[in-house]
């Protein structure tokens, strides 16, 4: 991809994030852009970093491993945003600063064990299946509190907030109830004041609906297509 095109798209996305935040009375620096670089070759990711991306989101361990190793000299943060299997936990804790997709005690237990081995406190988000779609990962809203309480005793995991993916709609406004439901759940859990739990982050909103997500409190927006174009 031509670096000028990428730079232009990135600046456009950043401008839209800034505008959406200001329009709802938020400071733009409270919204962090996760540039979703899955399936993008290393040289494209390098161009994105040079253009000003500082958080990259990856969905597949093996693909991410190669990129992260090659681009290790760049001061960027890597976030895992795909479905994670327990048997990949040992790689995930070595590669990623934050994992957005924790949805079971089994997975949390394995991550805690592997993080302990390398003396790391792994930052995580709990993935909530707000829309109750059978095709999506994530735990149901009513089970969230119990899981979070159980994970709160794990010494090498630090829960920072929640993540969700609403159903796809052509009209971004239709995603709003799902975003506000995640924020409400976050506030409910925050009010419980569970030890070792810091509920400040909400990872929600993608290329087709991130402005609405920001209005509903998103702190991480996961954007790929608007920066990198359609994937092959």
Image (tube, grey):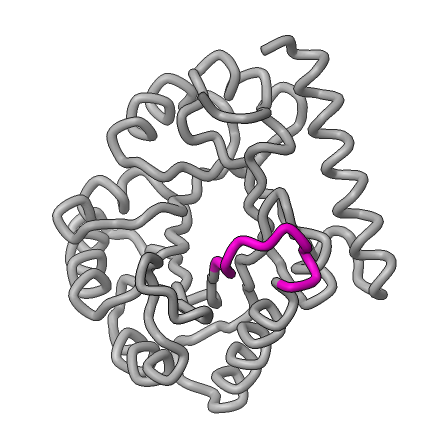
* Residue at the image position 50 percent from the left and 24 percent from the top: 74
Q: Position of residue 56 (x, y in %)?
A: 50, 36
Answer with left or right where residue 188 lies relative to residue 39: right
- The quarter of the picture where the C terminus appears is top left
Q: Position of residue 31 (x, y in %)?
A: 68, 53
Q: Is residue 192 magenta?
A: no
User: What residue span does the magenta drawing correspond to?
Assistant: 165-174
Q: Quadrant of residue 155?
A: bottom left
Answer with left or right where residue 24 lies relative to residue 202: right
Q: Position of residue 60 (x, y in %)?
A: 30, 36
* Residue at the image position 47 percent from the left and 62 percent from the top: 164
> Main structural element of the magenta stretch: helix, strand or loop?
loop
Please tell me whether residue 138 is drawn above or below residue 29 in the rendered image.
below
- The quarter of the picture where the N terminus appears is top right
Answer with left or right where residue 112 lies relative to residue 59: left
Please tell me whether residue 11 is drawn above or below residue 166 in the rendered image.
above
């Amino acid at each position: 991809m031509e670096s000028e095109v990428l730079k232009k798209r990135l600046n456009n996305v950043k401008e839209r994030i800034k505008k959406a935040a200001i329009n709802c009375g938020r400071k733009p620096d409270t919204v962090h852009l996760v540039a979703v670089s899955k399936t993008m070759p290393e040289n494209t990711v390098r161009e994105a970093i040079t253009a000003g991306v500082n958080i990259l989101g990856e969905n597949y361990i093996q693909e991410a491993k190669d990129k992260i190793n090659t681009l290790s000299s760049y001061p960027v943060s890597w976030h895992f945003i795909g479905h994670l299997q327990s048997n990949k936990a040992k790689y995930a804790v070595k590669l990623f600063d934050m994992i957005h997709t924790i949805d079971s005690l089994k997975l949390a237990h394995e991550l805690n064990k592997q993080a302990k081995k390398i003396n790391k406190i792994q930052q995580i988000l709990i993935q909530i299946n707000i829309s109750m779609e059978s095709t999506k990962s994530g735990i149901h809203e009513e089970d969230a509190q119990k899981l979070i309480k159980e994970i709160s005793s794990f010494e090498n995991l630090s829960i920072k907030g929640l993540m969700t993916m609403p159903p796809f709609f052509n009209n971004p406004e239709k995603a709003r109830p799902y975003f506000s439901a995640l924020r409400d759940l976050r506030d409910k859990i925050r009010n419980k004041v569970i030890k070792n739990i810091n509920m400040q982050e909400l990872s929600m909103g993608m290329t087709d609906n991130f402005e609405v997500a920001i209005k509903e409190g998103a702190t991480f927006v996961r954007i790929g297509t608007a920066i990198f174009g359609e994937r092959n």
